Image (cartoon, rainbow, N blue to C red):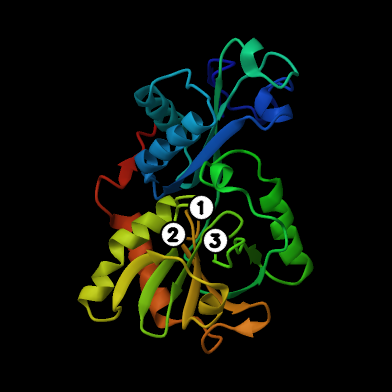
Amino acid sequence: MYSSIFGGIILDPAMMVIPIDDHMVHRGHGVFDTAMIFNGYLYELDTHLDRFLRSASKAKISSPFPQSSLRSILLQLAAVSQCKKGSLRYWLSAGPGNFLLSPAGCPTSAFYAVVIEDNYSQCKEGVKVITSSVPMKSPEFATMKNVNYLPNALSVMEAEEKGAFAAIWVDDEGYVAEGPNVNVAFINQNKELLLPSFDKILSGCTAKRLLALAPKLVEKGLLKSVNTADITLEQGKSAAEMMFVGSGLPILPIIMWDGKHIGDGKVGELTLALSDLLWEDMVAGPETQRICIPYV
């Protein structure tokens, strides 16, 4: 773990703590992001770091370091950890100082990061989902990756209680929004890849990478087109294929929604083809996407 409060990297788990008076702890005034570690490389670190600082700006949290220093700290932490496969998660907090609402009394903001080892693999088995009854966040909060994940946690718990993997939010206008910590994507009956528009939900880094890579399947004649759009609940449930899209997946097939099969109720070939595109990008993508970790 790295802590700007301690001013260095901590290897002892017992020391991996955050002050109780940190405003991220008792007021939820903080933002976070995650980059995946895969085969000794950090995948899409810069893309996630850019979004991280955009979230911080929306939350009115200034970083204690410039972006270049944050990047350097994260690379050093990954190197010291010796982790070859897992995730690198990092937070910006309004900082410790008091237990008030306003962070005006906090001497400085705080930056924390941890490496989490995880032997994740490509997801090829389909899961079941439900429509969440937990109110979704307003666009102002949904579009920034802040630490207030209580709605997300309650949404997942609701799904688990009903024997499903996760729940999906549908907005007040009846349009499909997102999952608890992932984006959603559909392939309709016309073989068009569609993702919900990002104006009211989190702009997923993996989802955007999918939009950049998927035209390769259009060139091969497997997909007709690739777009973002407003997707109604009815359109989503009548799709030929459906999937979650997120950093640690990168794609998770969905075969049933609210007890109704998606398509024929089996994992679709195009879903797997899209999963292969993202997985190959993680394994051997360009240097702009993969940063070699300088292990010590």
Q: SS for tag 1?
A: loop
Q: Can residue 17 be spotted in the picture?
A: no
Residue identified by numbered label 3: 177
Amino acid at the residue labelled 1: Lys
Residue 252, image x, y percentages: 51, 68
Q: Quadrant of residue 45?
A: top left
Q: Quadrant of residue 104?
A: top right
Residue identified by numbered label 1: 200
Q: SS for tag 2?
A: loop
The answer to whether the residues at label 1 and label 2 have Cβ atoms under 8 Å apart is yes
- Residue located 49% across and 43% down the image: 34
Q: Quadrant of residue 5?
A: top right
Q: Is residue 10 left or right of residue 131?
A: left
- Residue located 65% across and 11% down the image: 105
Residue 61, image x, y percentages: 53, 24
Residue lying at the far left in this picture: please name it: 219
Q: Nearer the viewer, residue 5 or 21?
A: 21
Residue identified by numbered label 2: 197
Callout 2 crowding tier (Cα within 10 Å): few <14, some 14–19, many ≥20: some
Q: Quadrant of the C terminus?
A: top left
